[in-house]
Each structure stands twice: as C-alpha cells, then as structure tokens.
Image: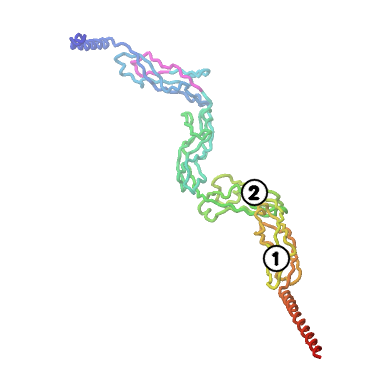
Amino acid sequence: MEKKLINNLKLKILSVFIAFFVWLAVVNISNPDITGTQNVPLEVLNESVLTSSGKTYELLDDKNTVTVSYKVRTLDSGSVSASDFRAYIDLADMYEPTGAVPIKIDVKNSHVDSVTAKPAVIRVRTEDLQQKPFELTPKYVGKPEDGYSQGSVSLSPSKIVVSGPQSLVGQISTVGIEIRLDGATEDLTGTLPIKCYDANGNEISLDDRVTLSRTEADYDQSILKVKDLSLNFETEGRVADGYRYTGIESSIKSVKVVGLKSDLAEISSITIPKKELNMDGATADKKVTIDLSQYLPKGVSLAEGESQITVTIKVEPLETRDFVLGSDSIRQVGASSHYSYQFDRDTVTVRIKGLTEDLDQLTEENLEAEVDVSDMGPGTHTAQVSLQLGAAYELVSCDPLQITVHDRTADETETAAESQDTSSRPAESESKMEGTSEASSSSAQE
C-alpha cells in the first residue's frame, strides 16, 4: 500500500498544481459573487431630539458595532473594508412604544450590493435627564505625622452640577476630592480630580452619560499642631449639713487641641470656672454637662471628639461613730516631776464624725489623745482631752476628765516627819525607865 502511494509521487503533485491553476482560470473568467461581512461602528444621530425634551437614552443591546453583510465580485472582494460602510440610527425615527430604531447603512463602495445589517433594529431606552448640584467635600486618606492634625480646607469650586440619567445621578451620595495626608507636617495645596461616591463612601465609576460641570478642584488644606491640655476644675458653694464634698470626677481628664504653634505655646491646661460647678445644698452626687469649646483660647479648637463632657461633683453623707480610749493611752502634756496626776476613770468615750471609709481607718493609736496639765497645781481639776485629728474628721464630743494632782514634795516631807516622830518615841521611854531605875536604887540605899 505504501509503495502504491509513493509510486508516481511527482506525477501526483503535478496534477494538484494543474488542478489549482485550472480552477483559478475558471474563477477569473466567470468572476462569481461572494458574501462578505465587516464590523462597522454604530453612530447615533439626532440626540438633541431627546435632550431638548429633558431626556437621555441608553442602547439596551449595548451595541457599539454592527455586522454588515454584503455581496461582491470575487475579484473585488479585496478592495472592501469597514470604512466603505456607515452604520447609524436616527433617534428621530424611534418607535416610542417599544423604543425600536432601525439601523441604516450607507455604502461608499460601488462594488458591493445586497447590503444588510445585523441586527437590523436597536432598542433604545429613554430616561429623564437630571441636573443635581453637589457641595464638594474632602475625603482624607492616611494621617498626618504624630503631633499634627488636619485643619480647615478650602475648595475651589465649592460646588458642582452633575448631569445624567436620573437613575445614575440618584446613586451619587457625595462628590469631592481625595486628599492624602500621609506624614504631613505643613499645609497642603494642589489640584485633584473630582470623584463621586455612593452612600457607603465607595467611589462610583461614572457612565459616559454622566457629566460634571467641573472635573478638577483646587484645594488648600491646613495642617495644625496638636497639644494635650489637662482639665482643671474650680468649685463653689457648700453642701448640706451632714454631707461632705469629696472631689470631682470627669468623663475625661485631658483633651487634645489643635492650633497654630504660636497660639498653643502659652497654654498647658483648660480651667472650668466656679460658676459651672456650684454645690450649694447638695445631698448627693451632682452631674453637670460642660461645653469645653466655651473655654478654649481664641484660635484653638478640639482635635477630636465632642466638645461636651460630663462632670460629677461627688457628695457623701457623714457618719458619727464612738471610740473608747483607755486613760493610760492619753498623753499628759506639761506634766511636772513634782506632781502626780490621777484620772477619775479608766476609759474616755470620744464621738467623731467623718466619712464611713475614713472612720474605718481610725484606731486608738492614731487618735493621739492628750490632755494639758501644765497649769494644774495640787487639787482636783476638770480637763478636756484633745485629739490630733486631720481635716477628714470632726470631733463631736468627748467625756471630760477629773484629774487629781498631788504634790510629791509635800507628801515626801510629811512621810519623813512621820517616820522621824516614830523613831524618837522609843528613846524617851528608855530615858524614863532609866530615871525610874535610879530612883528605886536610891530608896534602897536609904
């Protein structure tokens, strides 16, 4: 079989070439018609018919080109191109109920005929045209250098008009420019393209049918110095009897403010005046809302957060508690070594007023009770015990003491006299006995 195919191979190849040239000769002599196609751009005419009535349009088939079919002589087929045809629709010919517009073809090449377009009809949807003004707003990307914050921004123009189909313009929530703040330490200026954003802040890719009155905006963005200021609170008034002011609690202790370096140089804190924090007659905590913006220096503003803060004036009730002191724990001030001092009782009851938490910390040792006996002479005296109480406590009452003072010198003299008197009495007895003895002896001798 293989041998049969190989046999006369040259003759067979020659036969193929002869057949091709015979066919070519026949074609050139007969020159038959053939069908060709070209993709031709689609034009839209008379758009003003819709725009003049406040409407816009959309090609539902989303066609930008049309396939044009035609017949041409075989020998002329090489001279036909897409530029030989013009495909267009005339919106003045639109059939309103369906929105159908026929595609028309103009032929510029005389060698073609039987021209048809596919599709033959384009459907057009019309929609009301809307013009809506928008204020330009900046959208920030990144943050300035630590210790700095963005300040005010100036945009030119400040507003633009967006025109387009109502359904597309309705998707736009905000219009503005995107300003990059990465590492900024000084004012920024420049020109940026205007972008449209939806309600979620995402950029919207604009349709060709949506137009902006301006596509770019100039901006001047100030960059301000940031400083942390502490809050100082001043109070006035007196709480009700039986209660005590215990301090101020604030929702924040300090705030960050922004401003020019020269404006911030002289300030380190914000003082809330007394008039805001009056506690006259208070019997419980009192909450006050304060607007910090009222007390900021000129040219300085809050860097972040709301200007209103909540401040609580803390007020707590006082408690009265009795403490029993041993008399031996009472120190005698000004005692003389010539006197002895005797208390009329072993314990003294002291009544003290203060906050419950403070009273819990109070003990007999840290009361440091004492009594002044420096002016007391021999005899019985009434004295008051004094306590070393801090500002947290108030002495309500204390039992008075009866102190008996004895003169140690007089007692010692009297004791010595008694002792001497006792020792002289036996000597006198012996003398008397000796006299009696001698008298008896004389009598005997006589």
Pick whichever of labels 2 and 1 is earlier in the sequence: 2
Report the magenta residues as a range: 104-125
Q: Which amino acid does label 1 sit on?
A: Val
Q: Quarter of the image containing the C terminus? A: bottom right
Decide which of 123, 259 is in the foreground and name it.
Answer: 259
- Name the residue that disc number 1 marks: 371
Front-most of residues 380 and 254: 380
Quadrant housing residue 423 = bottom right
Query: For mark 2, what is the residue?
Result: 312
Q: Does the magenta stretch include residue 203?
A: no
Which quadrant of the figure contains the N terminus?
Answer: top left
Query: Residue 353, position in %: x, y?
Result: 70, 55
Which mark is drawn over residue 411?
none
How is the structure coloured here? rainbow
Residue type at mark 2 is: Thr
Label 1 environment density (alpha carbons within 10 Å; few <14, some 14–19, many ≥20): some
Q: What distance separates the C-alpha of mark 2 from that of mark 1?
A: 42 Å
